[in-house]
Amino acid sequence: MTHTFVQATYTPHRIARMQGNPLIEALPPEMSDDELAQALWLRPDFDSEQRTWENHFRLQQIKGLSNFMVPLTRHMELARMLDVMMREGYVARPPKTKAFVEKLRTAYEMQKAGQTYSQAHGHIASSDSAALIGPSGLGKTTTVRRHLARYPQVIHHGDLNITQITYLHVDISSDGASVKALAIAILTAIDKLLPDHDYHRLYLQKPSRSSTESLIYTVSRLLTIHHVGLLIADEVQNLCNSKKGSQTVMTELVTMCNVLSVPILFIGTNKATQVLTADFRQARRSTGVGIQPWTKMPRYDYGIEELAADSEALMDASEWAQFIEIMWEYQWVRNPVPLTHELLDVLYQHTQGILDLAIKLFATAQIRAIVTGAETVSIELLHQVYEQDFKLMHEAVEALATNNHAALARYADVAPTNLDEILTGIMNQASRRRIGSQLTQRNAPGFKSQIAVAAMASGVDEEHALSLADEIEADGKAQDSGDALKELAKKLKPAPLRTPSKSKNSAKPIDWPDLTDRPGDYRHALKAAHDTQATVFAQLQKLGMAQEAEAWIPID
């Protein structure tokens, strides 16, 4: 038995049809709206005093915005839907009952008869199936994970000697997988939760048990005996990449879950609508579950004309504005500014209501403000960050702004920019600028001495090094010590040795002395250069007797 389970404790349920069902009464009680909203909140650690911290600490704090979440109406509705799907799914599946045995018997008889779940396509529109579809960055998966985190994922019922898995989250692989690959993914997910059972060794290492049909029935049996309450199939748009047909994989999975009465939730981008069958969509139109479209957040919930006379009402009318207003409190710049309608409009212009993109634009603007010393978030800075750091998003954002369906189809799976990558890029730019600002200029004191020091470090005697420094300064090509470094490298690079002539007048071969006991002798490099027709300097470097001038010019 896994060590991550919790022992079941039961709370009598108020609803009659759920009373006495241990799978339901072992779940955490339903929450009130206020309790649910508090559970979904996710805010970074913040105090206004942190604005006085050193830059590197403030930059680390800004990264905490990556997981920022404000529970909006859509998040609350989704959380309620998940709770209802799980509990209602358990109503028809009490353990240790005739109905439970019947589920196992049905699966067994189908296997013996050689039937596949895909043959029972009529079950595709079960009310236990639902889909959550919308662009990346709206918080679909985040909300699902955030809500389900309040459930213990594995519950052990000691008196019944059963192990209950409340939910199972599976990502569909990028290649679209196949029915067999999806079955393996589900089995592997169960194995991670119940490692002591070692289903991987039992069913995947024996060829007779690892055929597609065998694995499907193995998975169906495991879903039943472990009382899986909800199966989440994420990244469902990847089924479009399936070589064996997306509809085959989709139908097989949904039908299996419906036969077993296991609720299933699909999550995907708009592209996923290509693999959700017409039957599934039609059947859902009159239900409260079905396909749940998550579109971009509207700038205003009501017509602008109706609210134009009341700016406060205009701000309050939009959940988008409420979300941004709460997010705007988390400013780590030294000179925070209040949120204005102009700032709100610019944020919406560049993100089109994609919450994750808005968070990252706001966070990146703060990063730039801190790194550059501006220390405030302005409209101009937001424009600059969008133009410089979000270039890959421009066409997708424009498609959303113009509601260009043809363009949106091309960008169905565009994900918002990764905040870590943005931070790394900005820090690298800042480092390059800082190094550039620290180079010694041609007219500054110490310019020639830096060149001479670098030359001597490369093996040049002091007199010659000073002469080289004078030449480089007099040439006027080097504007700073960085340019001087390049000029010095050119002057130190000797011409390659000429190939000895084969004429009668050619020089006799060099009689090299025995250098075995003199490993540090520079003549090793001379001999190697002569033998290989390489430069002496290259051989000095190879033998560790000389270094590039770049390593010796002090830039700090």
Image: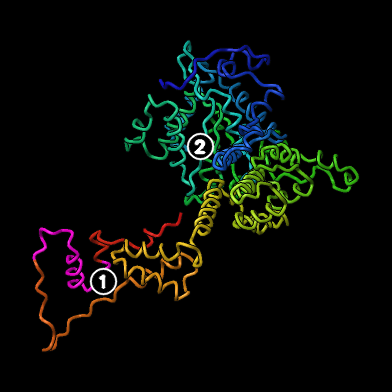
First along the sequence among labels 1 and 2: 2
Q: Which residue is mark 2?
A: 170
Residue 38 appears in view: yes
The quarter of the displayed image where residue 18 is located: top right
x 19%, y 69%: residue: 526
- Residue at the extreme bottom: 504
- Residue 535 badge: 1
Q: Which residues are magenta?
A: 514-538
Dot 1 surroundings within 10 Å: few (below 14), some, or many (20 or more)? some
Q: Is residue 17 above or below residue 424?
A: above
Q: Is residue 212 above or below residue 385?
A: above
Question: Mark 1 touching mark 2, by CB under 8 A?
Answer: no
Q: Nearer the viewer, residue 221 or 51?
A: 51
Question: At label 1, which amino acid type do we have?
Answer: Thr
Residue 163 % position (x, y): 47, 20
Mark closer to the observer (1, 2): 1
Judge from the rendering whether residue 464 lies leftward or rightward of residue 40; answer left or right: left
Residue 280 appears in view: no
x 17%, y 81%: residue: 500
Q: Quadrant of the N terminus?
A: top left
Judged from the image, the secondary structure of the residue bearing numbered disc 2 is strand
